[in-house]
Amino acid sequence: MSSKPIRVALVGLGFGAEFIPIYQHHPHTEMYAVCQRSEDKLRQIGDHFGIEARYTDFDALLEDENIDAVHINTPIPDHAEQSVKALMAGKHVACTVPMATTVEDCRRIVQAQQASGKNYMMMETAVYTREFLFVRELRDSRRLGRIQFLRGSHQQEMGGWPGYWEGLPPMHYATHAVSPLLALAGKEAEFVSCLGSGAIADSLAAKYGSPFAVESALFRLRDSNLAMEVTRSLFETSREYIESFDIYADRMSFEWQQLEAEAPIIFTGEEGKRVTIPDYAHLLPESIQKYTMQGVYDADDNRHLSFLQGNGHGGAHPHLAHEFVMSIVERRPAFPDAYTAANWTCAGICAHQSAMQNGRQVDIPVFR
């Protein structure tokens, strides 16, 4: 392992600011630079965290040879172009979800990662939550048994969010529901049939040409006898926020709770009981363990929607940063790497294509 700290630049300082103290306290990183188009926000964050290198221009940041890795937390439409640029500039890249919104852009990122030889990681919170880590532990200890079926749901009211969210096809932002299923199965999605249901306001539907309130998809997993179901909604559907997954296996099954205030259920045979999910901070360096339970936006008058909705992403943030950093230190692919991220993202993209064709089966591209 290299003893030289990895110099990280964080791009996008809304939700992205959650990661600043994690990188500042990680034993292998230096929180070197921040980037934000708003000079006032850039100054505020830079001063608060004592970060001297500051950029309002992403391209100028990439010219800084001191930067080893770029963590992108910008709006969805910017992910693909910024990821490709950063990889080709010789930077390791972590990018918030989704990877992109077209199959072509996912392929461009995979190709840029291959050409650059740098690490790419999609920062998917759903595969580093304490709930996911708990069920993964059940799987790895063989207590779960043989998985028989998987189901995921992500329902969220996005009214009032930034303009690019308005009318977004539900499955274009499906990775929170797709990823824990594929990760626990250890497989990729092969093909999908998806139906749209209901309708959103014409003013919303006109933005992307996507009319549905809900999209629900059935996937076949590659090289497997498994299938999985994913349901996604963004607008005009009454439901408490939920990012859930259910796993049905022959020895034990796991079902997400209906309400955030409840606990999930483990079934053994036909008997079910609610379980308390432990925290998994012990998997992290001691210096960042506290960030599974707290963050920048914890104060009641300064709470980010990741905490108001979704319980702070289930303690995932320090696990994500640690995986990204250690993949660089250990010179190995991150999880999820570019190939995996492309499959998880395109599962949703292809599901929406299927919904727009009344459920026609759509194959999900192979990127490896």
Image: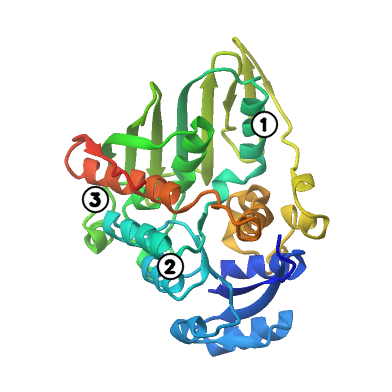
The residue depicted at 62 percent of the width and 41 percent of the height is: 260
Q: Which residue is mark 1?
A: 137
Q: Nearer the viewer, residue 295 or 327?
A: 327
| Three-letter amino acid code at the position of disc 1 | Glu
Residue 98 in the image: x percent, y percent?
A: 43, 56
Q: Residues within 10 Å of mark 2 (few under 14, many from 20)?
A: many
Disc number placed over residue 211 in the picture, else none? 3
Measure how far apart labels 1 and 3 are at the Cα level.
40 Å
Please indicate whether residue 321 sits to the left or right of residue 166 in the image: right
Mark 1 closeness class: few <14, some 14–19, many ≥20 residues within 10 Å: few
Which element is circle 1 on?
helix
- In the picture shown, does residue 356 fall above or below 258? below
Q: Nearer the viewer, mark 3 or mark 2?
A: 2
* Image-based side of 318 in relation to 153, left or right: right
Q: Which residue type does callout 3 highlight?
A: Pro
Q: Quadrant of residue 215?
A: top left
Q: Position of residue 205 (x, y in %)?
A: 25, 57
- Quadrant in which residue 19 is drawn: bottom right
Q: Which residue is mark 2?
A: 83
The span from disc 3 to disc 2 (Cα, nearest Å) is 30 Å
Q: Spatial distance from mark 1 to mark 2, Cα to Cα?
A: 32 Å
Q: Please tell me which of labels 1 and 3 falls first in the chain.
A: 1
The kind of secondary structure element at disc 3 is: loop
Q: Is residue 174 visible?
A: no
Expressed as whole percent of the image width and height from the top left, the position of residue 139 reads 61, 26
Q: Amino acid at mark 2?
A: Ser
